[in-house]
Amino acid sequence: MYINDVPPLDMADDSLFEFLHMEIVSHVYKEHESRGDNDKERGTCVSLLELMGFRVGQGLIERFTKDTPSFKDELDVMKFVCKDFWTNIFRKQIDNLRTNHQGTYVLQDNRFTLLTPLSSGKQYLEEAPKYLAFSCGLLRGALSNLGLESVVTAEVSLMPACKFQVVVQKI
Amino acid sequence: MSRQSNRTSDSKKMNSELFTLTYGALVTQLCKDYENDEEVNKQLDKMGYNIGVRLIEDFLARSSVGRCHDFRETADVIAKVAFKMYLGVTPSVTNWSPAGDEFSLILESNPLVDFVELPDNHNNLVYSSLLCGVLRGSLEMVQMAVDVRFAQDTLRGDNVTEIRMKFIKRIEENLPAGDE
């Protein structure tokens, strides 16, 4: 049943990241709570998380694509990110990719790993953006190192499904 | 099934890189937020503690390890099961105190510090402090109060990474500690 006698136990390091991510979000918000509670501060928290994700995304994609041949076009890059990159980080592919062929892409994940521990349905919906900021950054960082500057936002209407919107910036 | 074998090792590698890179980003951010290394160490330890108190459930669910009868058994489970499961490395358990209440975990390689170098102005930073908190928090949830510290750190020039764990006391069953 197992490949090379490697039991599922060995895949548990995924959960370490999930625990770390949760704690980072919690820490960032606790820190900024003590410095004043207003929209500006909350915006700062999201930016901070996004920026952390951005740096991590850049680093990850660099190592991941060391031996990959170059991509044909923008769509090729997006497909790679949706399949290979997403699978390697979140253990599943993006479920649906839509584009207007003019630089806007919507990546739909019906069971986003970082949201599944929170709820399914509408519970904690307002909290979801906190748990998506890092991943938006991750995506933006990966794309950046693949040559695509973009703006990445996320939207949730029913947990744990979410949509990442990528708008590629034309230089 | 067999085609997945490369995928398995690749995705395992990717996931551990995701963790180590994220941890690096966290330490970097904390160094910006706090004035001195001691404060960063404290924050990392606190965060580790918060992770540990939750991680223990995950660990027990995945490993189906039974209750440990003594500190030696605990040490073995930590080294051979927990570290292996979460960090993919198996530290050796050595340097037992005569009373059997203190031991060292020796890591030849510390996965947290892949790609990491400490800059000169952070001599007091104990980069992997999160681990101390994780160990402390998870053991507290199984009724053991322990003291955990780094005795040696490859990032600070030592040959190996040595984590020293000391048993303080058994905790009576009561309400779990809140988040710090």
Image: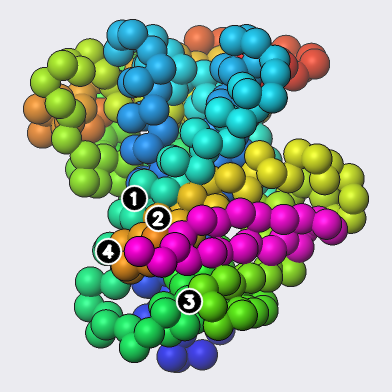
Cα distance between the residues tagged 1 and 3: 34 Å
Q: SS class of the residue under badge 3?
A: helix
> What amino acid does circle 1 point to?
Val
Q: Which mark is residue A63?
A: 4
Write down the residue under mark 2: A141
Q: Is residue B13 visible?
A: no
Write down the residue under mark 1: B89
Q: Give yes or no for contact between labels 1 and 4 (Cβ–Cβ under 8 Å).
A: no
Cα distance between the residues tagged 3 and 4: 17 Å
Closest to the observer: B16 or A158?
A158
Residue B5 place in picture, x, y as percent: 41, 82
Q: Residues within 10 Å of mark 4 (few under 14, many from 20)?
A: few
Cα distance between the residues tagged 2 and 3: 13 Å
Label 1: chain? B
Write down the residue under mark 3: A78
For residue B172, which quarter of the picture? Answer: top right
Q: Residue furthest front?
A: A171
A121 lies above or below B168: below
Q: Residues within 10 Å of mark 1 (few under 14, many from 20)?
A: some
